[in-house]
Amino acid sequence: MSEEEKREERKPKHKDDVEELRQVLGTVSDMVPNLIRGIVSSIFSAEAGKNMGAAAANFYKELKAAGMPDEVAIKMTEDYVHTFTDIGKLIQEATKKGGFNMKHGEKAGEDIQKIVEEEVRKKLSEKATEKPE
Amino acid sequence: MLGSLLTAWLTLGWNVRKARKAFEAELRKEGIPKEDAERLSKHFADLKDQMMSTAKDAIRQGRKAQSQ
């Protein structure tokens, strides 16, 4: 075995892991900001604002054409715009710690555990009653 | 890292402003009064605030998880 190979063998394995982790983190830190930027720019850009404005203006125009009073038309348009911009709340709900999904998942896990335990108990008692015969 | 976060925050603020202005311009084309157009476009700022608070919460949770 050459000196080089011996040295390679002595080199701790965790150094390779650290190097690999460094590469992964480097890739993630390159890609995640671009991803977030893409999502944000699809909502907050002049183009998106213009499109949303056109939709809201059209909605208002239709309400006015139907004979709706100014105040009511504005209030309804506000509600309409609010449905576009309500995704913030959705994201917040989805990412909230201990939110609906997590609690739901934990509860489902507990239920499954109870069912499995009951089934195991049943099987064991069945086997116990079969043995004496 | 901190620099890129600051840049992202500034860019977001600028983009929200541009989106609001474009939104208001479209509404005013249809004859909606300026005050009402501004009130309607306020939802953009609210959405930005919500997203920022979501990001802050996520960072806080990450720190808590690290410290535990």
Image (cartoon, rainbow, N blue to C red):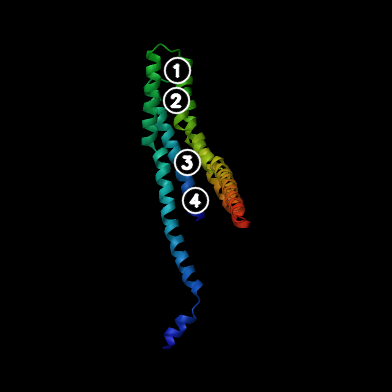
- The amino acid marked with disc number 3 is Gly
Front tag of 4 and 2: 2
Secondary structure at badge 2 equals helix
Confirm or deny contact between disc 2 and disc 1 (CB under 8 A): no
Report which residue position mark 1 lands on. Answer: A73
Confirm or deny contact between disc 3 and disc 1 (CB under 8 A): no
Residue at x-position 46% and y-position 20%: A76
Secondary structure at badge 4 equals helix
Q: Residue furthest front?
A: A133
Front tag of 3 and 1: 1
Report which residue position mark 2 lands on. Answer: A80
Q: Position of residue B36 (x, y in %)?
A: 47, 22
Rounded to the nearest angstrom, the CA distance separating label 1 from label 4 is 40 Å
Query: What subunit carries mark 1?
Result: A
Report which residue position mark 4 lands on. Answer: B5
Query: What subunit carries mark 3?
Result: B
Confirm or deny contact between disc 4 and disc 2 (CB under 8 A): no
